[in-house]
Amino acid sequence: MNARLGKLQKFIAEQELDAIIITSPANIFYLTGIDNFDSEKGFLLIVYKDKWRLVSSIFYKSRIENAIAAKNQLWLKRGDSIAAFAAKQLANCRAIGFEREDLSFARYEIFKKSLRGKKLIPISGAAEQFRQIKDESEIKLIKKAARITDKNFAALLKLIKPGITELFLKRKILEMMQDMGAQKCSFDPIVASGKNSADPHYEGSNKKIKAGEMVVIDIGARYKNYDADMTRMVFVGKAPTKYKNLYSLVLQTQQKAIAECKAGASPVQIFENAVNNFAAAGEDEFFTHGLGHGVGIDIHELPNLSPAGIGKFDNGMVFTVEPGLYHPGWGGIRIEDLCRMKNGKAEILSRTPKNLIEIQVK
């Protein structure tokens, strides 16, 4: 029994469950090593107190049959309902947990009908609570993803100039990621110039980048199913005083927050400290998102550096610190680093410098 499944089984016993249904692709990968991110929910994991079974369509047999022991494999025929099939495996259980945030209502209805008389109990964070503490093998993969991300930004920096469109740069990011060794991007990259940079999750357009504009570049590489995340700013031409002052404020707020990220500290408190730091400069209303988030198999996971955060920082956690200010009609500034908690303090994994970058305009 691998240690990850062992922790979950201990949790099952503590919650007085007989089994739990795991449907999240990220959690199935974490617990079994089976990659089903592109399977359209073709996999389902049942973890009992003393055993586990991976349920899947025969369509995926070549992916699984040599990856895990035969005793842990359960196959359904093409066209059969995976939920109805799985329910039959739970017939002798009385209390069954399921992933509250992941199981679809349609499948829940099938389980409810098939397991009439059993207790179906919604569980939040069953596997995620363990995933937030990364082991060294996971850290190694995340570091590799971070190095590819740094390399990608360095190459992109050479392409930024007036007349280039946001979508051209976005396409280059996507293209270079795989050329540099990534599976793909961790998320849809953001290239936002001028006033567009005031939208934190801007999707991009054919707008041409102009001299006298800031550009937000938010990118991340995915490597062997582990993610990285980093944001840097570029100013095309000579940056004006307002930009320099706000850039300095965002950077100072980020550096202060990273220094406060220590084992035992509250992510919520560190978020609130960042808000207060912006408030002292009269800028808090322009900070419109959380301070950061966990990164790993998913680009957004525990811990949360926001009002929704829970628990305390601990060694092994990997997370971003990304304060930003967004002025509608003018633009936005965000600086983001990927960090890990090691020996009680935050270690920055992003290596790209954070000095103010001005692109010379000829």
Image (cartoon, grey):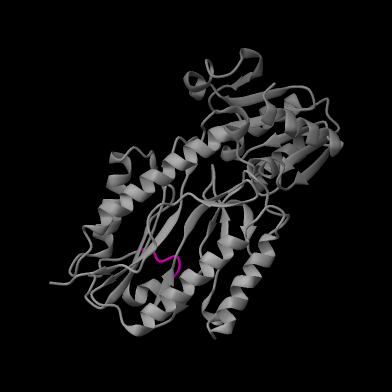
Q: Looking at the image, which is closer to me, 291 or 56?
A: 291
- Look at the image and tell me whether residue 117 can be seen: no
- Asked whether 160 or 67 is in front, the reply is 160
Tell me where the magenta segment starts and ends, as one range: 199-203
Residue at 60 percent across and 40 percent down: it is 134
Depicted 86 relative to depicted 269: above or below: above
Of 121 and 191, nearer the camera is 191
Instruction: Return the x and y of residue 308 as percentages of the image width and height.
Output: 68, 62
Main structural element of the magenta stretch: helix, strand or loop?
loop
Residue at the location (53% across, 71% down)?
A: 253
Left or right, 314 with respect to 301, comes to: right
Identify the residue at image location x=73%, y=37%. Answer: 111
Q: Is residue 247 left or right of residue 168?
A: right
Q: Which residue is drawn at 41% across and 80% down?
A: 245
Residue 60 counted in the magenta span: no
Q: Which residue lies furthest to the bottom in this view?
A: 282
Query: How many marks on residues?
Result: 0
- Name which quarter of the figure residue 262 lies in: bottom right
